[in-house]
Image (cartoon, grey):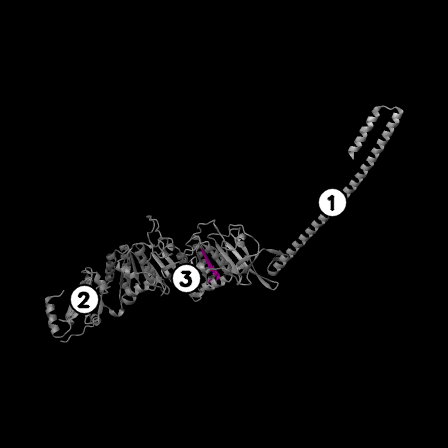
Amino acid sequence: MTKRIPSPTPTSDRLPKCPSGIKGLDEITGGGLPRGRPTLVCGGAGCGKTLMAAEFLVRGAVQFDEPGVLMAFEETEKELNANVASLGFDLAGLVQRKKIVVDYVHIERSEFEESGEYDLEGLFVRLGHAIDSIGAKRVVLDTLEVLFASLPNEAVLRSELRRLFRWLKEKGVTAVITAERGRESLTRHGLEEYVSDCVILLDHRVNDQIATRHLRVVKYRGALHGTNEFPFLIGEDGISVLPITSLALNHQVSTERIATGIPRLDAMLGGKGFFRGSSILLTGTSGTGKTIISSNFAQAAALRGERVLFFSFEESPNQIIRNMHSIGLRLEPLVKRDLLRFHSARPSLYGLEMHLATMFKEIATYKPHVVIIDPITSLMDLGTDSEGKGMVTRLIDYLKANQVTSLFTSLTQGGKAPQESEAAMSSLMDAWILLQDFEGNGERNRVLYVLKARGMKHSNQIREFLISDHGIDVVDAYIGVSGVLTGSARVAQGDLEKAAVLASQQEAAQLKREVERKRAALERKISDLRSDYESEALELRRIAEQVGTRTFVLGTERVASGLLRQADIKVAAITRSKSKTVKGTS
Amino acid sequence: MKTTATKRRAVAIARRHEPIWQLHLYVINQTPKSVAALVNLKGICEAHLKGHYQITVIDLAQQPQLAKADQIMAVPTVVRKFPTPLRTMIGTLSNTPSVLAGLDIMQPAA
């Protein structure tokens, strides 16, 4: 069920409101329908008037403890039960529990003959009795216009209707009156002149073979209200009006970062990956690897134990699982553990609004941490540019309010600058990664770069990435003369660099050998010199010895001659010690 | 509002295999319109169905639940319950020819 919308603070100068409980309607009307007054809901055939009125009653009885009376002029109780049961409402049960009274007013003109004056007091008694029997606070009249067809005297009818609406106000019930749309006026029989407090117009239009319902609050006396036309849809659990501007830009933000599943891409994003709760756009022409990168992101998140919801508008879940298996991503176990859920639908299955509502519903029930939409462009093609942008805005707002990280892939058409073609969406996105094909040298290579990443330092490089058996590999950047080198040019550049390194290595080795050789030569020279020196020293000693011997001999000869010439002993002693010194040095 | 006289008469008619008309008149309170309707209906019946009719006046102010059960919306309303099929007329029944046509009242056999 929907969340309960708090009624506005009851101030004396403010119109009291009666929450309808219908998703979105209370946001547009600022709290609901005017309490204690009649509201006119008009629209063409099949636009959901009766369902809206019935939902107003059922939600009143179930959520707000306000019993209600449904006075039906067109459908019998049985038919009504069946019709609202398709929206999940148990009307019969509520009737049984005395929360709702259904009164089918059967009128057929053929059975009516008129003669003389009359009034519709019988209807008042009937309605009054039904209201009093359960203490009803809400009344639905669906649709009074049948009376115009059945009662012959329109003047009586009009005066009685005026009385009826006055009487309803006096009763203090919040009433919803449905009416068929007129060709030039709001209603076919001008009921709007009696119900002047609140008029809601429903509309069902077909654009490009896709029908969309719209709701507009034409008039709401004494209250501010959204004046735009809002798309609404009838789903399995009632009506949801989708106010584009219902969410203000005030969602919580997280500083937590989450990895992309591609380490080198994380490195390009300031080393940590994306912010949690941010919206990421992944654009590229077909075959650039958008789904692969998304799947990588999905797998990484699921492996961290986060829930991932994957909306696929091009491939079936099994096809994605098979294809990703070929590059080493094993998604199936994650699906089995319910960490990854696929939701596949053809874009043309239903209109933009229905898609949006289904997505909201899936998100609300599964409560994912990460949502992937592959590709968002398929959906945007369904409506006009402004509708598409409106839808993405609402989707992003919704996801951000719930702190869900969202990854949108976008298929760009060849020949257009991607920045231009994504103008509608890019301003809504926090991060934008661009995938491109580089053609040249007879090959096609994939590159990626981070075009923007709000709130983080990111790489400005264009990087080539390879898709292999084990996933995605972002490779080193090689910048050549003509720009970034990819593919074989990059490999060639790599080889060149390798060769250069090898050459310089060899050169160094040669230098080293040279030095070694020189050192050896030097050593050799040193040892030569040393041996020269040694032989010379030996020679010197030998000479010295010879000199000593000669001196000694001379000395002895001198002593002998001194003796002969009577020389003193002193001289002899000196000579002896000298000869000793010479001996020591040898 | 059955009287012993009409009962007796009804029995007598039944014995003669003639139908008794069952007419229900729905009104709310004793308004001038209610009174006029009853007076007009009685007058017409006396003139054309003498002895073959029975009028039941139902005041919805006292029995509001009957409004839903008998599908009454406008008052006064007269419903021909018998003979079938059901015939409904609304208004004070002031226009006798249209009442005769609306309730399909035949001239009874003399």
Mark in front: 1 vs 3: 1
Q: The disc labelled 2 sits on which kind of residue? A: His
Q: Nearer the viewer, residue A415 or A440?
A: A440
Q: Tell me the chain of label 2.
A: B
Compared to residue A464, the image places residue A112 above or below, namely below
Subunit under mark 1: A
Q: Earlier in the sequence, mark 1 or mark 3?
A: 3
Residue A93 shows up from this direction: yes
Numbered range of the magenta stretch = A370-378
Residue A395 x/y as whole percent: 44, 57
Report whether A261 appears left or right of A160. right
Q: Are marks 1 and 3 in contact (CB under 8 Å)?
A: no
- Find residue B80 and report its horizontal and vertical position in percent: 20, 69
- Work out how far the residue at label 1 is from the one at label 3, CA to CA, in angstroms: 93 Å
Q: Is residue A348 magenta?
A: no
Q: Locate the N terminus of chain A by quadrant.
A: bottom left
